[in-house]
Amino acid sequence: MENSGLKILLHASTWFAPFLVPFVLYLVIDDQEIKKLSIQAILFQLVMTVLITISIFLIIFLIGIPMLVIFGIMTFVVPIIGIVKAINGNTFNYPIVGSWIK
């Protein structure tokens, strides 16, 4: 349950500063778990931004609408799951990018 407040801040920052807060926490905090989560959060936001942008372009072909809905929901729900796991003291890895950082 160590640094649970920082983990909650990191996950919740997706709604107000999705790149700034994880970057600052990565630079300031020495805890390796916080650094790992910070990198995952930044990568997750970058990947979701790219996927949503691609989905917007694919709307022209009507294939992007379901993708836009799914990725939009993921961008909103995944940080909530991270917050709940941080409150409970469990480990959380972001989907898609969680396995990229060891």
Image (cartoon, rainbow, N blue to C red):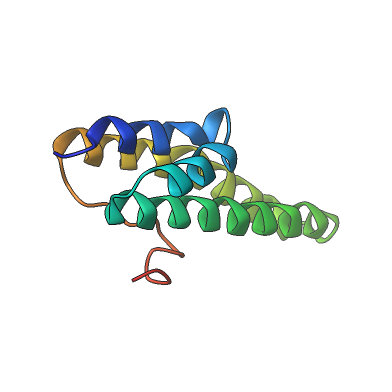
Measured as percent of width and height from the top left, residue 5 is found at 28, 29
Quarter location, residue 55: bottom right
* Nearest the eye: 37 or 44: 37
**Residue under the point 46% across and 56% down:** 39
Image point (38%, 53%), residue name: 35
- The x and y percentages for residue 45 are 57, 50
Quarter of the figure that contains the C terminus: bottom left
Question: Would residue 31 appear left or right of 70 to someone viewing this image?
Answer: left
Task: Judge left or right: residue 60 versus residue 101.
Answer: right
As drawn, the residue found furthest toward the right would be 60
How many discs appear?
0
Near-viewer residue (68 or 93): 93
Rendered view: 29 above or below 39: above
What residue is rendered at 45% in x and 49% in y? 26
Q: In which quarter of the image is residue 20?
A: top right
Q: Residue 56 placed where, x, y %?
A: 77, 51
Towards the viewer: 32 or 67: 32
Q: State the image quarter where residue 15 is shown.
A: top right
State left or right for residue 18 relative to residue 12: right
Q: In this view, does 27 lie above or below 39?
A: above
Q: Nearer the viewer, residue 26 or 62?
A: 26
- Location of residue 1 in the rendering, given as x and y in whole percent from the top left corner: 13, 39
